[in-house]
Image: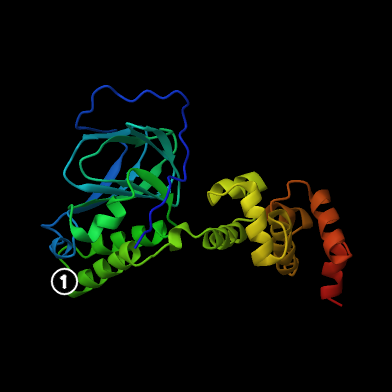
């Protein structure tokens, strides 16, 4: 199960003053989309310790405030950002994070930027022994890199309303495995860095910096540098360059793509900068390398 962890997302407002009164309130704009998984639709949820859950795609306006409800609330953020307000401060809810809100606590969560969609899964859990460790972590936002898996499982489960009970049971057991069998894995800094560079490799066109990469995996730049050297034998910046150069070799095989197109796909807005980096890495220009491939 999850081990006790500090909140890894710092408060976004200094000198914060909590609301003097908390209330039960829900607001959704007309553009918000929610799909519910209830006990009447998915009766297997109850036997495995769930109350109700939902898939949310939120924009323009969304806000939920609760005053000491008798269920635990979990939010799995896939894309976009939310803002969590508790009696202790305000915290940004980032992608690939799990927000834990234990029963009998006061809180408000809302979309942070109305112009950017917030995509997340929410679950309400009864205060059962099964969830004691998770609830014991308090009101926190922690890294959780299985949010996409949770989303996919919930979509499949939703599609099985009025479907196969055995298959629904299988999907729910996989959800339980993610929630109760992770040990310290979601908080393991080495795994976070490995996951980060998997994402970087799939999005080499983005303007990655060491600062952005460190924030992405909830580490300081110094921590990221140290773990990167342990994992890859080089700094995060050097690892980023290596990934881009390795991909460049693959892309240069396609004659229909100009050097400028290859550079853009690898995050280099200036093709001359790309050529300089490639020459420094391989000892020849991209054009010369391409010619050698077809001798």
Q: Nearer the viewer, residue 100 or 93?
A: 100
Q: Along the horizontal axis of the image, is 38 left or right of 243?
A: left
Against 68, residue 21 (above or below) is: above
Give coordinates of residue 124: x percent, y percent: 22, 50
Query: Which residue corresponds to the image point at 86% horizontal and 59% vertical from the top-left?
Result: 280
- Which residue lies at the image location 38% right of the left edge and 65% below the top edge? 182
Residue assigned mark 1:
165
Q: Is residue 28 above or below residue 234?
A: above
Whether residue 209 is visible to the viewer of this picture, yes or no, is no
Q: Secondary structure at mark 1?
A: helix
Relative to residue 272, is residue 63 drawn left or right?
left
Left or right: 270, with 198 as reference point? right
Q: Position of residue 270 (x, y in %)?
A: 78, 46
**Residue 21: x percent and y percent?**
23, 23
Crowding at dot 1, Cα within 10 Å, few <14 / some 14-19 / many 20+, comes out as some
Viewed as shown, does residue 271 lie left or right of 166?
A: right
Q: Nearer the viewer, residue 85 or 165?
A: 85
> Is residue 84 shown to the viewer in this render?
yes
Q: Residue furthest left?
A: 40
Q: Residue furthest bottom?
A: 295
Q: How is the image coloured?
A: rainbow
Depicted 290 relative to depicted 212: above or below? below
Q: Residue at x 47, y 42 (%)?
A: 9
Q: Quadrant of the C terminus?
A: bottom right
Total numbered badges shown on the rendered structure: 1
* Image quarter of the N terminus: bottom left
43 to 29, vertically: above or below: below
């Amino acid at each position: 199960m999850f081990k006790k962890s500090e909140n890894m997302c710092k408060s976004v407002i200094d000198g914060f003053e909590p609301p003097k009164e908390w209330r039960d309130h829900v607001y959704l704009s007309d553009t918000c989309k929610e799909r519910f998984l209830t006990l009447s639709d998915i009766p297997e949820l109850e036997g495995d310790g769930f109350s109700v859950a939902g898939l949310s795609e939120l924009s323009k306006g969304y806000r939920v405030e609760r005053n000491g409800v008798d269920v635990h609330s979990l939010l799995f953020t896939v894309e976009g950002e939310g803002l969590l307000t508790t009696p202790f401060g305000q915290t940004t809810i980032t992608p690939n994070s799990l927000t834990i809100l234990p029963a009998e606590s006061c809180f408000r969560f809302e979309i942070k930027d109305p112009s950017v969609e917030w995509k997340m899964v929410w679950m309400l859990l009864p205060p059962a022994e099964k969830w004691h460790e998770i609830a014991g972590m308090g009101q926190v936002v922690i890294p959780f890199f299985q949010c996409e898996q949770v989303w996919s499982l919930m979509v499949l489960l939703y599609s099985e309303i009025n479907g196969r009970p055995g298959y629904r049971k299988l999907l729910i057991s996989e959800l339980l495995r993610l929630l109760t069998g992770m040990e310290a894995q979601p908080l393991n800094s080495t795994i976070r860095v490995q996951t980060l560079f998997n994402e970087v490799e799939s999005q080499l066109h983005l303007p990655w910096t060491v600062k952005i990469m460190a924030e992405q995996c909830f580490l300081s730049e110094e921590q990221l540098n140290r773990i990167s050297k342990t994992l890859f034998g080089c700094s995060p910046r050097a690892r980023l360059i290596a990934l881009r150069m390795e991909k460049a070799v693959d892309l240069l095989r396609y004659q229909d793509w100009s050097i400028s197109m290859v550079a853009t796909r690898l995050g280099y807005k200036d093709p001359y900068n790309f050529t300089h980096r490639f020459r420094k890495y391989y000892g020849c220009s991209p054009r010369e390398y391409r010619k050698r491939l077809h001798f």
